[in-house]
Image (cartoon, helix red, strand yellow):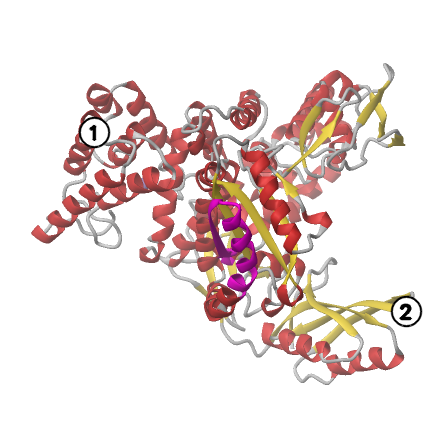
Amino acid sequence: MDSKNSEFTDEEKQLIQDQFQDLLQSARMSQSPEDKAIITKAFDLANRAHANMRRKSGEPYILHPIAVAKIATTEIGLGTKSIAAALLHDVVEDTDFTVEDIKLQFGDKIANIVDGLTKIAGVFDGQTNLQAENFKKIIMTMADDLRVIFIKLADRLHNMRTLDSMPPNKQLKIASETLFIYAPLAHRLGLYSIKTELEDLCLKYHHPFEYQRIASFIKASEQKRFTYINRFSLPITARLNAEKYTYEITGRPKSIYSIWHKMETKKVPLEEIYDLFAIRIIFDPDPNIPEKTQCWAIYSIITDLYTPRPDRIRDWISQPKSNGYEALHTTVMGPGGQWVEVQIRSRRMNEIAERGYAAHWKYKENTTTENELDKWIFEIRKMLEDPKTDAFDFLDEFKLNLFASEITVFTPKGESVTLPAKSTVLDFAFEIHSQVGYHAYGAKVNHKLVSLNQELNAGDQIEILTSEKQQPEPEWIDYVTTAKARNTIKSFFKDQRKNAATEGKLHLEWLLEQSKMQISSNIFRKLYNHFNTRNKDELYFKLGSQKITVDEFKNIMETRSRSKWMRFWGISRSKTNATQKFDKSKPLVVDDDTQGYQIATCCNPIPGDDVIGYRIADDELIIHSTSCPYAIKLSSSDSANVVKVEWTSHKLMAYLGRIKVKGIYSADAINKVSKAVTSQLDVNLRAMNIDCHDGIFEGTIDVYVHNNEFLTQIIKDLQKIKGISHVTRDMLDDKAETKIEM
Ligand code: MN
């Protein structure tokens, strides 16, 4: 609505009415006169409140709440109250109406949801420095009423769909937040299609070129895929028809984001990704036979026809995922020697897969998965109730909880325990009971003795060995992955730390007195930098356990250097209201003459890569890759300091990149590798390390180049060498100068 508000034209008024009628009709679960009346009343109020207001794109503002309400009902499956709340979601935020007004007209429930949504709005206005605090608020509201977060997701989805009308730096910021919290949240709540669309849209703004490339690749291979799917399905449909199943078979391409993710993590070129699609069989179950039995019957038909890969069966019907997902997945060898993933779902399972938790309300009889979700929300609530967790920690732990994919393990008595994948023996111990955790010294996994940091596999049976004498040790924090175990261990040490912290505080007071200084935020900032700490508690603890001399203290006060930690996280503590040298509304164009920027050592992007800038001081930027996890976290938690950056051609400055090679060892191969690198003009070799073992060699090549095209060229040249099996770009791990004049 920042753009000029002006009276709506007759056409626009008609459009609003049409869109609303369309919403009314598509709300299939709200067709009774009473329901329609509530929705219409909410629309009338919203329409009046947003009268003559416009979105950035220039269209009438009210079209946004209508669209959000439509997503809420058609894509999430929410009911009347939620539709009303969605229509009203921006009313309190943007107009003179209050929550009280809504309560009077619509009652407590709808008013509470709108109130929750209003608290969430304004979170990402860029004014707030510590957005992490606000994330915490979002989650808090969510724990009260899930509908708030469902509508928020619908709101976010519509904003992402219409992101084109926003300025570039806002686009990046909104996309980062979406990737950081909303997409994982949608995933956790089982809203699979929304999660996928959000991720795809993020990719579109973070890596526009790659997005377009993959999208057109999928489009170009459509016909081929279609033919293959037909060929693959034909024998299956024959058998399913013969056995009188009602079903549909679809061959869906995988999402652009998931393909991109696979390319990035597995380092495979697009052309070599074969499983671009999965076959889905959705059947209408025979009510007289359990769904599970029918799933396995179909599985058996498929594996009669095609050979399954034994390690690729995923049975989420016996034990649904904690986000409610149920299905039977298998991967079989299809025609032409291609692996094909087949997903078998009943109609009900399919609806749950698409709509997640919301769909469970429709299928009330299935309670197990609801319990799983309730359990999760219960955990989150507990995390929230701990007043000592600071917002950053909370965010980290919440994220841990979001991403976890689960394994099921067993107690000696055979009771099943669900844990996030990669959980350890110690996680299991704390899951059983905090006292078991505190006193654990080892375990027997499947009757074999193992240590506490042993990673668990699905199906393991674990017996924890305890001793009264055992106590938590500091390194335990690295052994565990679950939020529960981490929090329990942390709170154990918190008490111990308290004493040290009190001493540290006294020590600082003494230092200040000795050096005749007054306490100021500047002093704290320098100490945070020096000790690599983030807050006073941590600082006092460090000062308490490693006391420093007055001279050392004075030295610290005189240095200006920034710690690595400050670069990544602590920046929100630098002044933000100072005059900005970098104009955030315009992309910063980096050329050979640009001063005051550094290349992030976490992701070391080079010219040509998609990047963002993170402002650490008025005249200093760190350039991160847009897909760098740190950068994503920064743009979601401290977006006020994020600047869009564009590279121009560099002729003077050169940047350090690393290439990783693998292959079969021969003197000739190594020779050719070094030749491929050194024969390139305008490429400066910094280091080359080759390791050989058992006839295989592995190596890294560090080169200074002007932009990523040079790197791509070297990679292409290396790939042509006989005996080379793997060439990829890689991360740097040392502290080399990442940018030189060349
Ligand atoms: Mn909105």
Q: Position of residue 210 (x, y in %)?
A: 51, 65
Ligand 1 sits in quadrant: top left
Q: Position of residue 741 (x, y in %)?
A: 64, 74
Q: Position of residue 211 (x, y in %)?
A: 48, 63
Q: Is residue 501 left or right of residue 113?
A: right
Residue picked out by circle 2: 695
Decide: is 641 above or below 253. Answer: above
**Label 2 element class:** loop
Q: Is residue 303 left or right of residue 193?
A: right
User: Mark 1 belongs to which amino acid?
Assistant: Phe
Query: Does the magenta portion include 538?
Result: no
Which corner quadrant of the image does residue 581 belong to?
A: bottom left
Q: Nearer the viewer, residue 156 or 26?
A: 26
Mark 1 residue CB less than 8 A from any atom of ligand 1 = no
Number of on-image labels: 2
In the displayed orientation, state which residue is furthest to the top. 468
- Mark 2 or 1: in front is 2
Query: Does the magenta portion include 230?
Result: yes
Residue picked out by circle 1: 97
Q: Position of residue 436 (x, y in %)?
A: 77, 18
| Residue at image location 23% in from the left, 32% down from the top | 31
In the image, the segment drawn in magenta is 228-256
Decide: is 321 above or below 626. Answer: above
In the displayed orientation, state which residue is furthest to the right. 694
Q: Is residue 711 left or right of residue 463?
A: left
